[in-house]
Image: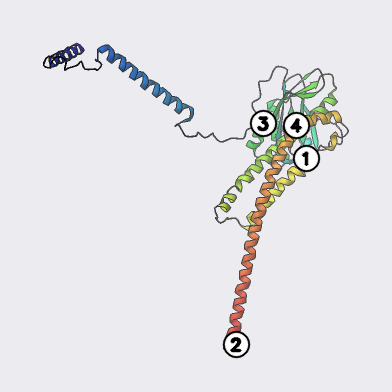
Amino acid sequence: NIWRDGTRNCHTGLHNHRCFLPRGVCQRPRFEMLTPLNLKSKTWSLQMRLQSTTTASMSVLKQGGMPGKRTFKGPRTKQPSRTSQPSLEEDMMQCIAYATADQYHLPTLCHDLIAHGFVEIKEFPRDASNVLVMGTENAAKPYDSGTIFIFREGSVVFWNVEEKTVKTVMRILEQHEIQPYEVALVHWENEEISYTVGEGNSKLHRGIFLFNEELDYDHVVLEKFAFSNALSLSVKLAIWEVSLDNFVESIQSIPEMLKSGQRVKLSRAEVMQKIGELFSLRHCINLSSDLLITPDFYWDREDLEQLYDKTCQFLNINRRVKVVNEKLQHCTELTDLMRNHLSEKHSLRLEWMIVVLIAIEVMFELARVIF
């Protein structure tokens, strides 16, 4: 009704206005009449424009925040190499490796394990003297026997051993460890690989160990040793990588302080301690381990050497060692720079002391001559 009254009044006003003007002088005004249908359509189009603008703005905000600004990615966290393993099938068994300490005392460890019901596998080559092979009846699955490889260098590999027995062995190992690692780090930096028994030659195929079911038990143990040797090197290298990352983090502020011209607040003893940590880590990786060369055990056993090399290649051991050595080289250059800087400061201090002593001697000589 309001729209009708307003439209009627508008028409009446226009008609009265045209009546007072001479004929031919007044022309019909050219503007669009606001009818209810017209106003409704214009209001609808305005609402659609507002809605489309709002939707576009929301989509921009969802995709990358404010337009024109770059969104930053979250920090990259270090994950274990293979923690998200697929669910094991019925005939699949599990092999898991840990590095718990720098070294084990194998003679006393062997007696302690035998006292807890484990059996030592003595039918093993004598040139593999750095490993202790134990058997257990507590197998996780009935398709294979439970086997444990304990390496003198501080790593242990379990083959088809139930979880309760694994925890028991880990508690026994704590009593025979030399320089043990943190428990959280041990369980974080591990290697888990599934394996099965079937037809064909033993090999590593698509991240799974395949064993020939026709081989005798002694030869299967040797093949497991080859795989375990590579796994033990991988977990030990993972521990050293964490140690190197911690070392890099401890000296991370030094280049920035040198760049900004600030004084580096490190004493000579602290710098020498850093150098000692660096060379100790370098010695462990390049000299006291088999990361750079193939062990002598595989020289006359080509089939086992192929399994060992294939596993090392799958675990990217060579590439990881190369990256670690490059980081060590950079850290060595930085520590040498700090040592040279402190040596120059010490030499400068000695020179000033000598100058002061000479000046004092000259003053005494002048005083003796004058007085």
Give the answer, above or below, for where 4 lies relative to 274: above
Residue tagged by mark 4?
313
Question: Secondary structure beneath disc 2?
Answer: helix
Please, what is the three-letter code of the amino acid marked with disc 2?
Val
Q: Quadrant of the N terminus?
A: top left
Q: Residue at x 66, y 52 (%)?
A: 335
Question: Is residue 185 at all visible to an observer of this figure?
Answer: yes
Mark 4–mark 1 Cα distance, whole angstroms, equals 13 Å
Please, what is the three-letter code of the amino acid marked with disc 4?
Gln
Based on the displayed image, in which of its 4 quarters is residue 96 positioned?
top right
Residue 54 at x, y percent in the picture: 39, 24
Depth check, front residue: 169 or 371: 371
Residue tagged by mark 1?
292
Decide which of tag 1 and tag 3 comes sooner along the chain: 3
Question: Secondary structure beneath disc 1?
Answer: loop
Q: Which mark is residue 369?
A: 2
Please, what is the three-letter code of the amino acid marked with disc 1?
Leu
Residue tagged by mark 3?
81
Question: Secondary structure beneath disc 3?
Answer: loop
Q: Is residue 12 left or right of residue 187?
A: left
Mark 4–mark 3 Cα distance, whole angstroms, equals 14 Å
